[in-house]
Amino acid sequence: MTGLLEIRGARRSFATPEGGRIAALDGVDLDVGANEFVTLLGPSGCGKTTLLRSISGFEALDAGVIRLDGRDIGALPPFRRPVNTVFQSYALFGHMSVARNVGYALEVGGVARAERERAVAEALDKVGLAGFGARRPSQLSGGQRQRVALARAIIGRPRILLLDEPLSALDRNLRQQMQLELKTLQHNLGIAFVFVTHDQEEALTMSDRIVVMRAGRIEQQGSPRDIFRHPRTRFVAEFIGETNLFDVTVDRIEGEVAIGRTAEGLELRLPGAGLTVGRRATAVLRPADFRLAEAGLPVTITRSVYLGQDLNLFAAPAPGGPEIRVTARDAADAPEVGARVHLAYDAAAVHLLEGA
Amino acid sequence: MARRRDRLVLAALLTPVTLFLGVFFLVPLLTIAVFSFLTPGLYGGVEWAFYHWNYGRIFGWADGIMEVFEPVYLRILGRSLSFAAVTVLLCLILCYPVAFWVSRLPERWRLVFLFLITLPFFSSLIVRLYAWLLILKPSGLLNEMLLGIGLIGAPLEILYTPTAVVLGMVYVMIPFMFLPLFAAVDNLDRSLIEASYDLGATRFQTFRKVILPQTLPGIVGGSVIVFIPSVGNFIVPDVLGGAKGLMAGNLVEQQFLSARNWPFGAALSMLIMSVVLIVLVTFVTRLRPKEG
């Protein structure tokens, strides 16, 4: 993968109303390859939007460098950077037609009218809005406005397209449809996308690489599967998907398997490699890692949440103790609340957090 | 049934405002319109006989015996219009950048500034204009200061000149321009400006293609609100303009109060009103954002 964008040691802090300073970016290194779909994921205030805005040029860094194609672009104003943004609010120009909105980058760039009209028609076609050029943004639905914003941002063939939570205002069905379309569009256009979101599902669906941010730092980055299956910290494990976390102390080793014991006395089988008796660790088990079985961890079902195809079960190993989340198929023999069942899981599939 | 009730409710809601406007706006307006075609009474008031020479005096078909055509009335109207236009322009130039500046202030300071801008309304206009008289007169504050620092050798003659009138008008009208402009600028979505930069537009292009059209409603609104009273204003030229600074508003005032020729005053009023209306309609329709 060739390096397209290179960020090194990015720092940016803001004054708080209380008179202190808060670091929005606290030493961030990031690389984006050509034709890569990178998602910046994190809770609000983690610095993901600040990072995006420092790429587009709307935030100046206190320290650090931003290089695009090897050229330092840190000092360039936004209108000289070969990157375009899809804004969260879309930011369409209400006093212009859809066609003029889409062609804006070419209009201010001095492209001749005929050429502009051809490019606008092509861009509108790409986002499935052919024939909508004469309308005003106010005459479009939320999903259509989103597409106009997208067409407007890609018409100038930017080196990188930046997307600032562009799907957050759409309803669930439309959002899922747009997620797939965005991924396809990115593939067809062959330009890199940097996508900001706080929605982990969105990140998992679209990204080539997810960058999890927390308090101005990069917590972990990797492929969606890697981030989901092998979270490195408790924060990442809890932020990506539903998780059961068990703080255990290794009690004994039985061949390939280590037995860990929680403070409540619950015993869990863990992959034994590298563990020694007395060692503390945090075990990560996703709700789907458990299955209902004849033998295994004895639990009582305390709550059952119907999700359609699946059930979200809350199971307590001991009355009043911490609950384990379990995903089960909704079937005729699904356990009722109060039922005593056993949970089975594959010891080799249990993931242990580093340094816990 | 529901339809009928809706209509009754609508009628009940509309009645008060209709009555109020009818009694206090339409009736006086019609009175003036009718008066402008009546014969002036010998000692003021009107005689109920049709009389078109009121307009003849202004436009040039006067008989030359009872009524004399004087082109000065049209000239004065023209001057009033141009003074009002200059006032609008100066208010706009002064207020537009300030509106941007104020909209970026922290909430607390914004309120302070908006309070300051409305502060003049708390005192009488006449008093404030006499204060300007004290500032502008040859031995006034301004001249004393300029003489004091040696910028001028002799006192400037500002008072009783067109400059003084425009200065006074701008001073009086600034709040009326500022408030609608501020509302428009404050409502401007900042992300639109960012989107424009992001798409490669320079600062000037962004101003011309995004900021200006987006704030145009405020510009038009402020201009209209300043232009209308500026054309008919007679207090500012009275206090700061002196004898030579006669404006259309002063003419009307003279006809009603000094010359006691109500029909002629009414005719002048109708003329001012229709000219203002024509100017505004042209202005507003021309400034509609053009779509390309």
Image (tube, coloured by chain):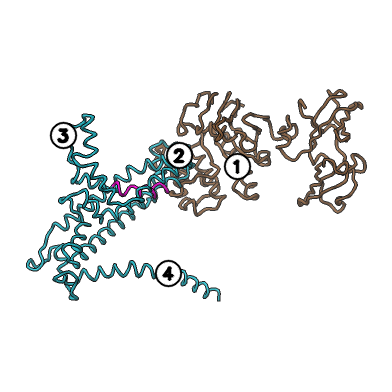
Chain colours: A brown, B cyan
| Numbered range of the magenta stretch | B170-183
Given this view, does label 1 or label 4 mark the residue nearer the observer?
A: 4
In this rendering, position of residue A7 left or right of residue B249: right
Residue A203, image x, y percentages: 66, 38
Which amino acid is tagged 1? Leu
Residue carrying label 2: B105
Contact flag, marks 1 and 4 (Cβ < 8 Å): no
Residue carrying label 3: B154
Given this view, does label 1 or label 3 mark the residue nearer the observer?
A: 3
Label 2 secondary element: loop
Q: Is residue B256 above or below residue B91?
A: below
How many angstroms separate mark 1 from mark 4 (CA)? 56 Å
Chain letter for mark 1, please.
A
Which amino acid is tagged 2? Leu
Residue B201, image x, y percentages: 43, 37
Residue carrying label 1: A182
Name which residue lies at 47% across and 26% down.
Answer: A75
Label 3 secondary element: loop
Name which residue lies at 55% across and 53% down.
Answer: A141
In this rendering, position of residue B280 left or right of residue A7: left
Residue B39, image x, y percentages: 16, 72
| Along the viewing direction, whichever of A19 and A90 lies nearer the viewer | A19
Chain letter for mark 3, please.
B
Residue carrying label 4: B16
How many angstroms separate mark 3 from mark 2 (CA)? 41 Å
- Main SS type for the magenta part? helix
Residue B151, image x, y percentages: 21, 30
Q: Which mark is residue B112?
A: none
Given this view, does label 2 or label 1 mark the residue nearer the observer?
A: 2
Name which residue lies at 21% across and 68% down.
Answer: B36
Same-chain status of marks 4 and 3: yes
